[in-house]
Amino acid sequence: MDYKNKNAVITGAGRGIGKAIATAFAKAGANIVILEKNEDKDNKLKEEFSSYPGTFTYISIDISDYNAVLDAFAKITEKLGSIDILVNNAGITRDNLLIRMEEKDWDDVINTNLKGTFNCCKAAIPVMMKKRYGKIINIASVIGEIGNAGQINYAASKAGIIGLTKSLAKEVARRNITVNAIAPGFIETSMTKSLPENVVEDYLKSIPERKLGKPEDIANVVLFLSSEAANYITGQVINVDGGLVM
Ligand code: NAD
């Protein structure tokens, strides 16, 4: 797939799944914009991405901040002229049973995962509508489909992302903009690294492929959904989970 001259904005791409997505787009020739809460310490990412053919922009931002997001997208549009692809990937967990969950744990997860996705869609859609072209991919989770004890905030945010995806897909379909979601299963990143070994073993038993996924497994599907080969796919949730949810 060739993404030369395509401008791709990816949130939370400082590490993990987002970084794998940004890297896959960069290798395919796209101009990359990373919106990430953490700083790019010592310009490490900037240096890493300088070997790819497209341009690289790193914006340090909290995507739950509505005005900051609108501002950032205005600057991106001024610099690049358009936004062709938006991948809403940034996400956090603050796990606890409802009985012990603090209000802040609920608010932080909903504000980052769900409101952050709204903020970026809200900022990108007018630009995409103007060009009559756009591909939005929202990273949900299998947990948004099947739930999980200890993750009511995360599950609600990801189920919300699925509802947002389907509704927005209906709103913008006639403008040549597709909106899809990916529901990853258990992927090897820092988000899952802290799980105790016995918990991972239990998870593995419920995954028909009997293995955890890699960030690249998600990046491959993002690139497909962003390509012209996927023009007739919108409002869908694609599970990338080794068969966990069928
Ligand atoms: P990760 O924690 O490794 O990376 C998430 C990135 O998002 C980090 O770089 C973090 O700094 C950034 N981020 C967090 N809050 C932000 C904010 N407010 N503004 C900007 N950036 C912010 O996580 P990951 O495993 O790579 O997960 C990526 C996405 O995939 C998340 O949405 C997650 O919910 C989803 N997901 C992951 C798994 C998994 O097994 N790892 C499974 C299902 C879904």
Image: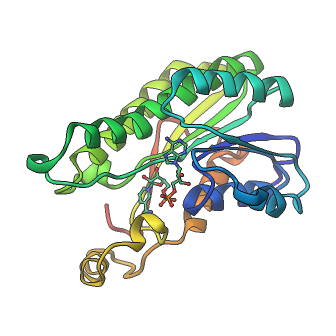
Q: Nearer the viewer, residue 109 or 7?
A: 109
The answer to whether residue 152 is above or below residue 193 is above
View extreme (front): residue = 42
Which residue is located at x 32 percent, y 73 percent? 195
Residue 50 percent across, percent down from the top left? 87, 58
Q: Is residue 25 left or right of residue 180?
A: right
Q: Quadrant of the N terminus?
A: bottom right
Asked whether 90 or 85 is in front, the reply is: 90
The residue depicted at 38 percent of the width and 52 percent of the height is 141
Residue 101 lies, in percent from the top left, at 17, 46
Report whether 172 appears left or right of 166. right
Q: Is residue 164 above or below residue 195?
A: above
**Horizontal and vertical percent for residue 228?**
73, 43
Quarter of the image with the C terminus in it: bottom left
Q: Which residue occupies 45% across, 48% down?
A: 91
Residue drawn 61% across the image and 19% down it: 174
Image position, residue 70 (x, y; %): 62, 21
Q: Quadrant of residue 158?
A: top left
Q: In this image, 83 relative to 171: left or right?
A: right
Count of labels shown? Answer: 0
* Front in this rendered view, residue 24 or 38: 38
Which quadrant would residue 231 be assigned to in this image?
top right
The colour mode here is: rainbow
Q: Is residue 209 left or right of residue 100?
A: right
